[in-house]
Amino acid sequence: MVLDKKVAEQTINYLTQINAIKLNTKNPFTWTSGIKSPIYCDNRLLLSYPEIRKFIAEKMSEIIKNKYGENISITGVATGAIAIGALIAERLNLPYSYVRPEPKNHGLKNQIEGFIDKGSEVIVIEDLISTGKSSLNAINALRDESFNVSGMLSIFSYNFDFANQRFQNENIPINSLADFNTLVEMILSKGSISEDELKQQLKEYLAKRKEANADEAAKKVKGKVVGGTRGNAVLEFVSGAPVKEQVIERSPDIFDYDELSRYG
């Protein structure tokens, strides 16, 4: 959830300014999860810009201080949030650690790097929330070591309904400086692309995926999966169509085209 619309808009302005947010419906990007998306957000770029990283660290620090107080620790999720998490912890003068996707296979074989007292209240920092899988992996690792995870804060969230539900199921409050809904609003308001053009690009994108026989894969799990990319989330936002999204781990990049065709 975005807490401050002006901060969200400024965050997106900064990320767009340094080309950290990219839109390409004709040649979609592949995320770590395997999902193919016409939107890609690389927040690691902001670390190279002093004014921008200062703004991000400052605003995230303000949220943490206002919502959680000072008797907490900060933990970043590797690798994208290691640096921004450290900047936040430094600004707030709080203990800091970071969590790897899995334990190292050598040395001390740590998954959590840094020292924080067991039972401490921890706020987890992410650079980006998409499916939520890597974020929850980090949260579970912290819980396994007896840390109390009180919330998660990210720079940007794609605002997937199924991801939000995952965090809700785990009783983890999540907030973001900016999200995908704000991004789409700004794209349309600036007139760089009209609503009709955006819809047309998404139709072409979905058609391209259908030509690649993604629809055949979808038929095999019909009724189980709807969604899997940002394309239909944009479509939902600009058209008001209720595009539902669910995830199955074995194939996150599948569409139910019968469902999506109703909105095309």
Image (cartoon, rainbow, N blue to C red):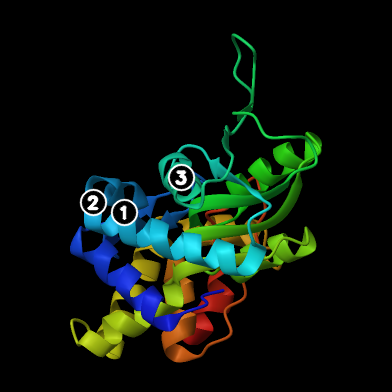
Circle 1: residue type? Arg
Q: At 63% across and 68% down in the image, what residue appears?
A: 67
Q: Position of residue 58 (x, y in %)?
A: 40, 61
**Which residue does the numbered mark 1 point to in the structure image?**
53
Circle 3: residue type? Glu
- Is label 3 in a helix, a strand or a loop? helix
- Is label 2 in a helix, a strand or a loop? helix
Circle 2: residue type? Pro
Q: Earlier in the sequence, mark 1 or mark 3?
A: 1
Q: Nearer the viewer, residue 237 or 259?
A: 237
In this orientation, does residue 24 appear? no
- Quarter of the figure that contains the C terminus: bottom left
Tags 2 and 1 in contact by the CB under 8 Å rule?
yes
Q: CA distance from mark 1 to mark 3?
A: 13 Å
58 lies left or right of 17: right
**Which residue does the numbered mark 2 point to in the structure image?**
50
**Which residue does the numbered mark 3 point to in the structure image?**
90
Q: Is residue 95 above or below residue 20?
A: above
Q: At 29% across and 52% down in the image, what residue appears?
A: 46
